[in-house]
Image (spheres, coloured by chain):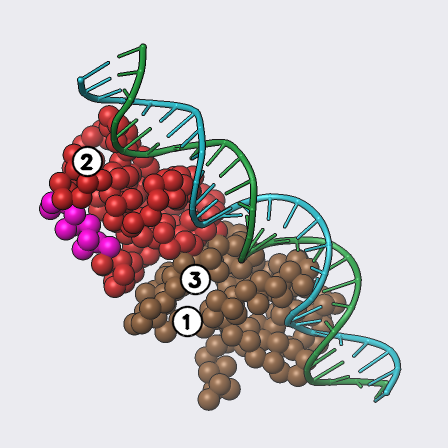
Chain colours: A red, B brown, C cyan, D green
Amino acid sequence: MKKYDLALLFAALADRTRLRLLNLMNGKEVCVCYFVEILGQSQPKISRHLAYLRRASIVAARREGKWMYYRIVVPKHAGAARILNETLSVLGEDKAMQADLSRFTKACCAPQKLPALDGAPLPIPVEAVGCVAC
Amino acid sequence: MKKYDLALLFAALADRTRLRLLNLMNGKEVCVCYFVEILGQSQPKISRHLAYLRRASIVAARREGKWMYYRIVVPKHAGAARILNETLSVLGEDKAMQADLSRFTKACCAPQKLPALDGAPLPIPVEAVGCVAC
DNA sequence: CAATTATATACGCCTTGACAGATACGTCCA
DNA sequence: TGGACGTATCTGTCAAGGCGTATATAATTG
């Protein structure tokens, strides 16, 4: 449990768009195009916020062909991990965040109905991704 | 559990000075002069950060004569409360924060040795303050 | 009341972040 | 090799935050 900049973690969490992104990533590795579609925000905006989260080391990116997958990375620092997990849990209780998730799962069931998602790779449960990383 | 701006809470927590202040306030109502002395920062700086925490509704101030006491106010919103409490708990495990606290308690034992604190009111355990509020 | 003490706010400066829009980069496919 | 597509970054603009310094407010004391 070495020194860790908690203020930096909180700065990363101090934006609604980033909280929505984290909520969508909770438990899965998600392709950028889904974020753009589900949050209805411009692609550069999504990308910038993902870059911010990456800089703060709470998400990691993985390229697969032309798609980028993002996933949450729980910090090594035990305290930071507790705060992040608690935050994810609180997000899960939020109505608006649940609405995002429900649009998300709906989109996953019929991606071909959304032009932007037709042909895009589905999110991958993190358990399954674990193998890829090894 | 109505709508609550979590991002605003995180913004309030996204500064080291404010985290140190919260850590010092944990469990007690503290006079501003103690913050200034223990953190070794300028009085206006401390005051501005306290104002920020007040704006974010996670601390409350009480005037008593010429002194101002600050204390933590746990948000009504259950999720926010969990995050704040978890944060305070994590702060308590941090070496630097513990060092602040140990200088704090030492100062309280012999305030007259520190010019700035000579005659200043000691911090008050929150349990005791509860009565005042009623 | 004037002076003093405790605290808050205003001001000016600089840095950072958020945004939209344009563009660059990386990968795949024809 | 040149699109086409998915994604990232650059540019410029604006607002907000952090700091030090100076000053204002509030309560107390002489």
Q: Which chain is mark 2 on?
A: A
Task: For mark 1, give the secondary structure.
Answer: loop
| Disc 3 and disc 2 on one polypeptide chain | no
Looking at the rendered image, the quarter that the N terminus of chain B falls into is bottom left
User: In the image, which residues are magenta?
Assistant: A100-110
Q: Which residue is mark 1?
A: B74
Count up the numbered dots: 3
* B90 to the left or right of A99: right
Secondary structure of the residue carrying numbered label 3:
helix
Q: Earlier in the sequence, mark 1 or mark 3?
A: 3
* Residue A87 belongs to magenta span: no
Residue at (51, 74) in percent of width and height: B60
Where disc 2 sits, the SS reads loop
Q: Position of residue B79 (x, y in %)?
A: 32, 65
The percent coordinates of residue B44 (x first, y second) are: 67, 63
- At horizontal 16% and vertical 50% (from top left) the residue drawn is A105
Taking depth in this image into account, of B56 and B82 the one nearest to the observer is B56
- Is residue B75 in view? yes
**Which circle, 1 or 3, is nearer the viewer?**
3
The alpha-carbon separation of the residues under discs 3 and 2 comes to 35 Å
Q: Is residue B93 above or below residue B67?
A: above
In 3D space, how far apart are the residues under numbered discs 1 and 3 (Cα atoms)? 11 Å
Give the amino acid type for the residue marked by disc 2 in the picture. Ala
Residues under numbered marks 1 and 3 in contact, where contact means CB atoms less than 8 Å apart: no
Residue indicated by mark 3: B9
- Name the residue carrying label 2: A120
